[in-house]
Image: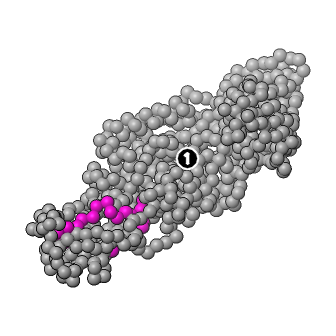
Amino acid sequence: MIDYIPPEFEYVPFGSIEASSCAPYVDDLSWRGIMIRMPEEIRLEPDDAPILPICGFYQLSSLPLVQGAAMVVHLRGVNSTMVEEQSGRVVITDGQNEPDIPDPAANEPIDPELWRYKVSTAFFHLNGQSYFREALSPGSYELYVSYGDTKSNIVGFTVNHR
Amino acid sequence: MQDLQAPGNSQWGGHPSQTPVLPVEDFHIVAVEWLDGTDTKVIGDCDQYVNLPQDAKWLGDSDISNIDRLGISPRFRVRFDRPVSGSFKWRVVPVGGDASEYSGAEKKRNAKFVPGKLDWTSASTCGDGTVIMVNAAQLVAGGGYKFKVEAKDHHGAVVSTGVITTKRLFWYSELPMLNLSSVLSSTGTVEAEFAKHHLVMKQLADLAIPHQQNIGSEAEVTTLKSNISAAVAGNPTAVSKAPYLLRVAYTDHLAVKNPSRPQRVDGVKVGPGAAAVKIPVSSTGLRDGDGEAPRWLWSNLVNGEGWFVSAKYMPSGRGAAVILPANKVSMAGDLVRSRSIEVDVSDLPAGVGTLIVNVNVVDRMRGGLAFGGTPNICICTRAWWNTVGHHDQACTVVHEMGHQVHMVVDGSGNQPDRVTTQYDKRGHVGSHCHNGCASGQEDYSTSDNVKASTCVMFGTVNGKVAFCGNCAPAMKKVDLSAGF
C-alpha cells in the first residue's frame, strides 16, 4: 500500500484522457502550455514497486504534435542517490495484447496551412515510474513533462520509506 | 529364436522362485523396442506426441494410431533370447542434437525439459525373458527432439530402439461470423508454419457465430466470447478436445472508438458569405504513448453510431457561445470515411472566434486479439473500411496462436529462456519480438520499426508469417502439455 500526500492521488485514473479531480485545468482559450500536478510526498514500503502519479493537461498548437512530437517525462534528483537526470519517452505500456493494423494514411504528409489554427487539448494521467530505468529510491526529486518543444511546470516531490 | 510372448502368458510365469537360473553366458539380449498399441506389437522409428496425455480420448481426429504414441514416457520392451529373469542396463540416448537443447536454467524450471534416464540404469526381465518398461524413459516436452533407448546385457552386447521424434499436437476450430465478406480461405500457410516447429494442427469443422459489426467495447467482447462458447458447447467433438482446442473466431472490424474528442480551431471568420471551415481531425490516443495524431471519424462502422457529437462557436471577446446544429457540420470529401470535417458558418453573425466540434474518432484498429486465459483468438477480416487480405489474416492467426503457445517466452514460469529480442511495454502491450529492429528502443510502435521487423511475433501486423530465427528455438522447446 502506497500513501500519497495529498491523498487524492490514491485515486488517479491512470490512462484516462478525461478530466479528473487530480488533474489541473486552465479555463482560458488563449493559454498554451502543459500543466501537471503530482503528490508532494510518496510513502511506501521498501519492497513496494513505486507508482508515481502525474496528472496533467495540455493545450497546444496541433501542428507540431501531429508532426510526430513525443511526450517525455524528465526527472532529476534534488536530494537523493540518483546522480544523473533521467528521462523517458511516454510510450504504450498498458492495455490489451493486440496487434494493430497500421493506419494506411499514417504517413500521409501534413499540410501546415490546414493545421495552422488547430488547437489540441487533452488530459493525461501517467505513472511516471513506467518510463524510468531505475525504481525511485527515498529522496527529493523534481519532475516535468515535455511535449515537443513545450515544457510543463516543474513539480517537486519526496519519496520516503515507511 | 524364441517366439514373442506377452508377460503373464509366459509358461515360466513371473515369479522369481520359478525362474530358472542359468549360467550368465547362456542368455543374450535380443531387442529393445518401442511398443505400439499392445504388449506385443512393436514399432521402429516413430513420432511421439508428448503434450497429450496417454488416454484413448485423444486419438480421435488426430491420425495417431494408439495411446502408446501419446505422452512423454513411451513404453518399451526388452527381450532376451531365453525365458529367464536376467538383468540388463538401459538408457535414453539423444540422437543428433542442435542449438535448441535445453539450458541448465530451463531444466531447473521444468522437469519436462530433462530427458531421462541418460545414464545406464539397471533393470531385469521377468521370468519369460521380457519386460515392459512403463514410465521409465522420459523424452522432453519440446518438439523435434530425437531419442532412442539402448539396452545391453551382461556380455556387453548393445541393442537399441528405433528413433522416436517428439511432436506436439493441438486441434482448432474456425468460428467465422455469419455474413463476413472475406474469411481466410485456407489455413494451409498457418499449419505449415507451425509444422516447421514440430507442432501438428488438426482442424475440426467450422462453427458459425452471429455477426457483430465491430468488436471494440467490453460489452462487444463479452458478446463475442459468449457466442464462441455457445457454438463450441453445441459441438460435442469440439468440447471433447479441451484443453487442447484453440478457437479461432473471424470478425468484422476490431475498431476502438475514442468518443467525443474536441476539434478546435481559433481565429475563424464567420458570417454571411464566409467560406465553410475545414478542420482536420486529430486526437490524442486512448493509450498512454499514443500521442496526438490525425484520426479518422467514427463513421460507417456500426449501424446507429455516428461521428458527430456537438458543435459550438465562441466569438472572440464577450459574446455568448452559439450551439451549431448537426446539419451545419459534415464530413469533408469521402462519404464513407474521412479525416476532416467542414463547418458551415455562414448563418452566424459576422465576426471572428473559435469553433469547437466534438466528434467520435477511431482510436485504432486491431488485426486480432488473444483473450488472455481463454483458448479464444479473434481475427479481423476488415480494417480501415477495407477487406484484410488473406495473407494478413494468416499472419494474424499465426501471431495470435503464437501467443497461445506462450510466445514470446520471457524466461519465466515453466517455459524456455527469454528470446533475446523479446520485448514488452515498449510501444506494444504483451510479449513480442523486435527481431530486425535496433535493440534497446523505447518505442517499437513506429512505422520504421514495422518495416524493419522480421518476425510474425512483432507487435504490429507486419506481413510476416514466420517465426524468426530467435523465436524458432523457443517454439521447438515450449511445453504445451497443459493445453490452452
Query: Quick check: can you spot residue B292?
Result: no
Residue toward you, B226 or A86: A86
Query: Is B138 a magenta residue?
Result: yes
Residue located farthest toward the left when viewing the structure as drawn:
B11
Mark 1 surroundings within 10 Å by alpha-carbon count, few (fewer than 14), some (14 through 19), many (20 or more) = many
Residue at which label 1 appears:
B367
Residue located farthest toward the right when viewing the structure as drawn:
B317
The dominant secondary structure in magenta is loop
Question: In the image, residue A66 lies at what x, y percent?
Answer: 76, 43
Question: In the image, residue B301 lies at what x, y percent?
Answer: 56, 35
Give the left or right position of residue B425, taking residue A52 as reference.
left
Query: Quick check: can you spot residue B236?
Result: yes
Within the image, what quadrant is residue B26 found in? bottom left
- Does residue B27 lie above or below B206 as drawn? below
Q: How many marks?
A: 1
- Does residue B286 lie above or below A6 as drawn? below
Residue toward you, A137 or B49: A137
Q: Residue at x 48, y 33 (%)?
A: B222
Give the left or right position of residue B145, taking residue B64 as reference.
right
The residue stretch that appears in magenta: B126-150
Q: Residue at x 82, y 40 (%)?
A: A139
Question: In the image, residue B388 lies at what x, y percent?
Answer: 53, 49
Give the left or right position of residue B381, taking residue B122 as reference.
right
Within the image, what quadrant is residue A117 found in? top right
Question: In the image, residue B197 lies at what x, y percent?
Answer: 46, 63
Q: Residue at x 58, y 51 (%)?
A: B431
Q: Quadrant of the N terminus of chain B?
A: bottom left
Kind of residue sitting beneath label 1: Gly
- Does residue B367 lie above or below A17 as drawn? below
Mark 1, secondary structure of its residue: loop
Within the image, what quadrant is residue B120 found in? bottom left
Residue toward you, B297 or B165: B165
